[in-house]
Image (cartoon, rainbow, N blue to C red):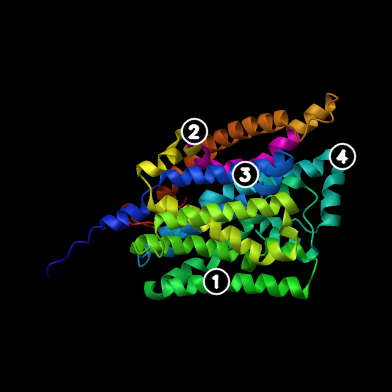
Amino acid sequence: MKMSRPTPPTRELQASTARIPELDTLRAFAVFAVLSHHYLPGFAAKMGWMGVDLFFVLSGYFITTILLSARGEPYYYRCFYMRRALRILPLYYLLVGSILLYTKLASAGAAYQELVHQWGSTLWLWFYAGNIRTAIINAWPPNFSLSLLWSVQVEEQFYLLYPLLIALVPTKHLRKVLAGGVLAALVIRTALALALPGHWWLQFCLMPCRMDNLAMGALIAVYARESKWPLRAKTMLWLAALGVALLSLVVYYAGPLWHTLPMGTIGFSIIGLTSMMIVSWTVLNAGKPSSKFLRFRPLCWAGKISYGIYLLHGPVAYVIKSFVSRLGYQDFDKTPLSALIYTAATLAIAAASYRWMEEPILKSRARIEQILFKVPAQAKRPEST
C-alpha cells in the first residue's frame, strides 16, 4: 500500500503562522502605555492602563493562530501546555518567590504579615488566582508589584480550557462562538455592576469579564486564516482612530473611568473594539509600505521582551525609588526624569532576563518534550509566543 505524503502547508497557512514584526511593535506600544500609567502623572497615566486591553487582543490573536495551525495534531494538547508553561511560569514564579521572600525578610516579616492580613493567603498567587482574590475582597494586594500580575492570571485562566474549544468547535462555527464570548463578557460585567455596585474589581479583574478582548483577538486569527475580512483596511483604520479619539476625550474630561459604571461595562468593549481594529489593520497590512513605521527595530525588540518588561517594571521602580529616597530625594517619583530612569533600568533587566533565562528555556522546549512526552523531533508543535 502506497503511503501518501503529508500535504505541505498552504501559502495562507504559512503566512498566518509566520512571525509578524509589526505585532511586536504593538506589544511595545502596549507595554510602554502601561509604563506611562505607572511612571508618569497626568494624561499619560490616565490613558496608559488601556495598554493591557491591547495586550489581551494580541494574546488572543497569537494563541488562536498557534492552536489553529496545530489543531488535529497528535501532540496538540501536550505541546501547547508544555510550551505555555515554559514560556510563562519561570519568570512569573521567580518574581513571586523573590517578592515574597523579600517581604518575609524585610522588617522582620512585617510586610509579609501585612500582605496576608490585608489581602489573604499567598497561595492565590502561586495558583494564578490572585485576580480572583482581588475581585472577592475588592482590593489590590498591598504590594504594587504583585498587583501587576492580575492580567497574566486572567490570560492563563482563559487558556486553561481554550485549546479544548478550538479542538472541538468546527471552524465554520468558531466565529459565532467567539462573538458570543464577546457579548457574554459585556452581559456579565453589566449584571455584576448592577448587582454589586462599587465592586469595580469584579469587572476589571475576573476572566469572564475580560474574555471579550481575548475573544476579539481570536476572531482576528480566524479571519486572517480564512482571508475573509469583514471590513476593509481603510475602514479599520478610521474606526481605530475614532475609538482612540473618543476614549481620549472621555479620559481627558472625566479621568480614568475604569471604576465607573459606563467604563466598567460598555467602556471596556469600546477599548477592546478599538484594539481589535488596530491589530486587524496591522495583520492585514503586514509587510506592506503602509506599515513600515511599525517595523522599527528598537520597538520590535522591546515588543519581543515585553513580557519581562511588564512583570519587572514594578520591582525595578520600587528598588530605584527606595534607593533615591534614602539619598534624601522624596519628590523623585512620577517625574519625567524618574520615568526615564525607571524605563531604562527596566529595559536593561528585562533584556538580561530574556537573554539569559527566557530564551535558553524557549530553545530547549523541543528537547524537553522529547524527554517527557517522547514527542518525535520532527513532530509539528503549537509554538508559543
Dot 2 or dot 4: first in sequence order is: 4
Q: Residue at x 75, y 46 (%)?
A: 144
**Coordinates of residue 342 in the picture (x, y in percent):** 68, 33
Side of 174 relative to 336 (left or right): left
Side of 110 relative to 53 (left or right): right
Q: Nearer the viewer, residue 238 or 35?
A: 238
The disc label shown at residue 106, or none:
none
Mark 2 surroundings: few (<14), some (14-19) or many (≥20) residues within 10 A: few
User: Is residue 314 magenta-colored?
Assistant: yes
Distance from disc 2 to disc 4, alpha carbons, whole Å, reads: 41 Å
Q: Are marks 1 and 2 in contact (CB under 8 Å)?
A: no
Kindly identify the amino acid type of the residue bearing the numbered disc 1: Gly
Tell us which disc is closer to us: 3 or 2: 3
Mark 1 surroundings: few (<14), some (14-19) or many (≥20) residues within 10 A: many
Distance from disc 4 to disc 3, alpha carbons, whole Å, reads: 34 Å
Q: Are marks 2 and 4 in contact (CB under 8 Å)?
A: no
Q: Quadrant of the N terminus?
A: bottom left
Mark 4 surroundings: few (<14), some (14-19) or many (≥20) residues within 10 A: few
Distance from disc 1 to disc 3, alpha carbons, whole Å, reads: 26 Å
Kindly identify the amino acid type of the residue bearing the numbered disc 4: Ser
Q: Nearer the viewer, residue 211 or 119?
A: 211
Pointer 1 residue: 181
In this view, the residue farthest toward the top is 327
Q: Quadrant of residue 374?
A: bottom left
- Could you tell me if residue 75 is visible in this image? no
Mark 1: secondary structure: helix
Dot 1 or dot 3: first in sequence order is: 3
User: Is residue 302 magenta-colored?
Assistant: yes
Dot 1 or dot 4: first in sequence order is: 4
The disc label shown at residue 298, or none:
2
Pointer 3 residue: 33
